[in-house]
Amino acid sequence: MQQVPVSLWTLVAGIVVTAISIWIGHNHTLMPVQASLQAPLVDGFFNVMFTIAIALFLVVEGTIIVFLVKFRRRRGDDTDGLPIEGNVPLEIFWTAIPTVIVLGLGIYSVDVFNRMGGFEPAGHPHSAAHVAHIPGSALAATLSDTEATTAPAIAPTIGIGASPQTLNKPADLVVDVKGIQYAWLFSYPDSGITSGELHIPVGADVQLNLSAQDVIHSFWVPNFRLKQDALPGIPTELRFVATKPGTYPVVCAELCGGYHGSMRTQVIVHTPEEYDSWRTENQIAQQQNPNQVVAINPADLSTSEFLAPHTHDMGISAATLESLVISH
């Protein structure tokens, strides 16, 4: 029987590995639902990297398995292996391929970063959100119109700004975002609303002016594929367009203290009509009650108060929780 040439086996293996890698790279379910205009750009880059990673995994692990089977020690074979010292063409090959891959991914990532607005974070005024701390409240940070002070406008020079398509165009909605230990506060300069949740209309070009009151925080919306640090004393910007109505988690992705894991809120993407209704209702509510609660600071809670929402979901009564806290 005629032996199949190694080159033909290599060609067949290459076709199979390529097909499997491309299919897995574009049909995985590792990412959450896309909900912003920037998300497909990030997912496209991720899919390319994941496809390459799958291909490399199959080639390396497949080669190991083939060699384990083909070159295994046979029973009764006590001879030495072949004295192979090196292979210059093979070493050039496995050095050149990763180099080309890294250069290609680097160029691709720069293009994605540019299309998302990473090279144009500045250009529009930054209206800082001002939060007055009122002593005596153990459960909330509150906003006081009488105690708030006005700071000079600062233009963010770091972050994700206008895309090439929206360059030199003002955003449809500007929201000032302040990170504190351990909550996010959202202030709307155009309406005077302050909230513990981010509310935006679908399809609007939104600009978030980020700042931090104490330590470094990181504003991350997984469904938007966007993350930007909030830095004390240095304004940063995050500009995006939400494409799908819904409620999506906002997470602090920077270790910021003991209650870092609880520094979560949500962004609610409304239809334009729903957003107008929300804005009108909150403007009226805050005019009637300017000192309304906007955010809970976990650091000010007792142990039982902090654990209460979680123990409620587990079916543990308040009395039982209190007794456990006291006993420990």
Image (cartoon, rainbow, N blue to C red):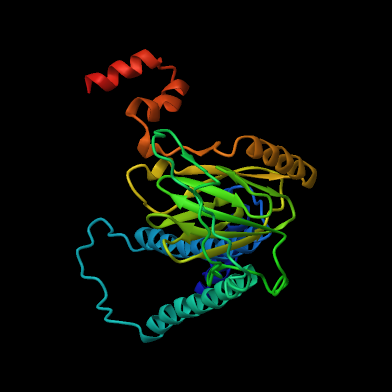
Horizontally, residue 14 falls left or right of residue 296, namely right
> x, y percentage for residue 65?
40, 58
Is residue 40 depicted above or below 110 in this figure?
above
Write the residue at 27% across / 60% down.
Answer: 73
> x, y percentage for residue 110?
56, 75
Is residue 319 depicted above or below 142 in this figure?
above
> x, y percentage for residue 255?
37, 52
Horizontally, residue 271 falls left or right of residue 200, namely right
Q: Residue furthest front?
A: 146
* The one of 160 and 133 positioned closer to us in this rendering: 133
Is residue 231 depicted above or below 255 in this figure?
below
> x, y percentage for residue 42?
59, 62
Question: In which quadrant of the rendered image does the C terminus lie?
Answer: top left
Write the residue at 76% across / 40% down.
Answer: 277
Is residue 224 depicted above or below 118 in this figure?
above
Q: Is residue 267 visible?
A: yes
* The one of 315 and 198 positioned closer to us in this rendering: 198
The quadrant holding residue 275 is top right
* The one of 30 and 194 positioned closer to us in this rendering: 194
Q: Is residue 19 visible?
A: no
